[in-house]
Amino acid sequence: MPKNNTIKVKSTFGNSERIKQLDEIDVQLLQFLQENGRMTSAELARRVNLSTAGLQKRLKKLEAKGVIDRYVTLVNREALGLDLLCFAQVTLAHHQPECIGQFCDRVKGLPEVLECHHLTGEFDYLLKVVVANPQHLEKFLSEAIAQIPGVDRICTNIVLNEVKASTSLPL
């Protein structure tokens, strides 16, 4: 770690370079929030040795910089009867912008799709999908995904066991 106790996180996009500087307290705050987003401001401030006002100022700064994107509640899918977790690899027949845009727009509206990633390689998109059971999966694939114009091929994998599932980023 640099002597000034600042961690530099670099990312590049095209020719521009963004550097976000996080000090040790920022990193600790992010680690605590990733573990328990419901921790009270008083408890969080105590753990990082700040006043509540000082904590709020830092959190607002992290939000303004885009380091903290949003606050969410993680819901147990199985408690809601969504017992089947799957990954669907989708290949489009055409790669014109309107076809890609239409696919993305339709997928964004499907509540069963938790994540959609545009990929390099053999498949164009990887979808993380939750459904109740195999019948729900079959209906979802045939009536929702396969009906999107331009979808050429779908290859689905059913998750047998989640070995690791985390939303915490390594800091």
Image (spheres, helix red, strand yellow):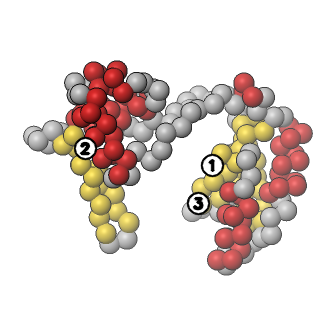
Q: Residue at x 73, y 40 (%)?
A: 130
Quadrant location of the C terminus in the rendered image? top left
Q: Say if mark 3 contacts mark 2, CB within 8 Å.
A: no
Q: Residue at x 83, y 59 (%)?
A: 146
Residue matched to label 1:
115
Q: Amino acid at mark 2?
A: Leu
Q: Point out which mark residue 119 bears.
A: 3
| Percent of width and height locating residue 158 | 74, 38
Q: Residue at x 78, y 29 (%)?
A: 81
**In terms of image quadrants, where is residue 131?**
top right
**Which tag, 3 or 2, sits closer to the chain's start?**
2
Q: Amino acid at mark 3?
A: Leu
Apparent side of residue 99 relative to residue 149 in the rendered image (left or right) = left
Question: Element type at marker 3?
Answer: loop
How many angstroms separate mark 1 from mark 2 (CA)? 28 Å
Quadrant location of the N terminus in the rendered image? top left
Question: Element type at marker 2?
Answer: strand
Q: Amino acid at mark 1?
A: Glu
Apparent side of residue 9 relative to residue 39 in the rendered image (left or right) = left
| Percent of width and height locating residue 169 | 42, 39
Residue matched to label 2:
22
Q: Say if mark 1 contacts mark 2, CB within 8 Å.
A: no
Which mark lies nearer to you, 3 or 2?
A: 2
- 43 and 30: which one is in front? 43
Q: Is residue 94 visible?
A: yes
| Percent of width and height locating residue 116 | 63, 54
How many angstroms separate mark 3 from mark 2 (CA)? 30 Å
